[in-house]
Amino acid sequence: MSGFAAIGLHHPKHPDNVGGVLRAAAAFGVALVAIAGARYRVQRTDTAQAYRDLPLLQVENLREVIPYDCVPVAVEITADAQPLPDYRHPERAMYIFGPEDGDLGRSVLAWCRDIVVIPCRHPLNLAAAVNVVLYDRLAKQARR
């Protein structure tokens, strides 16, 4: 399958988790990571030093950096979210993740075409959620 995945982080709270997200991005071949509301500082959790090998954007608004013809996909716990195991990933997707201690809010969900939820007993931390979504995408691509 051609295409790509991009990651958007909406006001992440913990810098260590952002480092973990970058490590996951490097491991799964993500094309771009954008961070809204925070300024990145090199983290020990980014053991791959991914910020050197992939575009890392620091922006005010994630919506403004969605690549052309790319589907924004919110990863959020909402009543109308589609469970990740049932989700068919778009060829070109930008997965939007909220802060560890909050949610994306209506203003972000309004411009996301799809909303998916990771079914689990307790919410995952940011880096873990990114790893799960990217692995699910890769596994489903391999099956096609």
Image (spheres, rainbow, N blue to C red):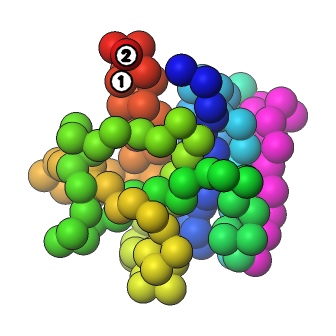
Quadrant for the C terminus, please. Answer: top left
Dot 1 amino acid type? Lys
Q: Nearer the viewer, mark 2 or mark 1?
A: 2
Dot 2 amino acid type? Arg
The residue identified by callout 2 is: 144
**In the displayed image of the protein, which residue is found farthest to the front?**
69
Q: Nearer the viewer, residue 82 or 98?
A: 82
The residue identified by callout 1 is: 140
- The numbered disc on residue 58 is none
| Residue 8, position as x, y percentages in the image | 61, 57
Residue positioned 34% across, 14% down in the render: 143
Spatial separation of the CA atoms under disc 2 and disc 1:
7 Å
Classify residue 49 as left or right of residue 1: right
**Can residue 7 be seen in this snapshot?**
no
Q: Do the residues labelled 2 and 1 touch (CB within 8 Å)?
A: yes
Q: Nearer the viewer, residue 37 or 14?
A: 37
Quarter location, residue 24: top right
Quadrant for the N terminus, please. Answer: top right
Quarter location, residue 62: bottom right
| Residue 27, position as x, y percentages in the image | 60, 23
Q: Is mark 2 on a helix, strand or loop?
A: loop
Residue positioned 63% across, 45% down in the render: 6
Magenta highlight range? 49-60
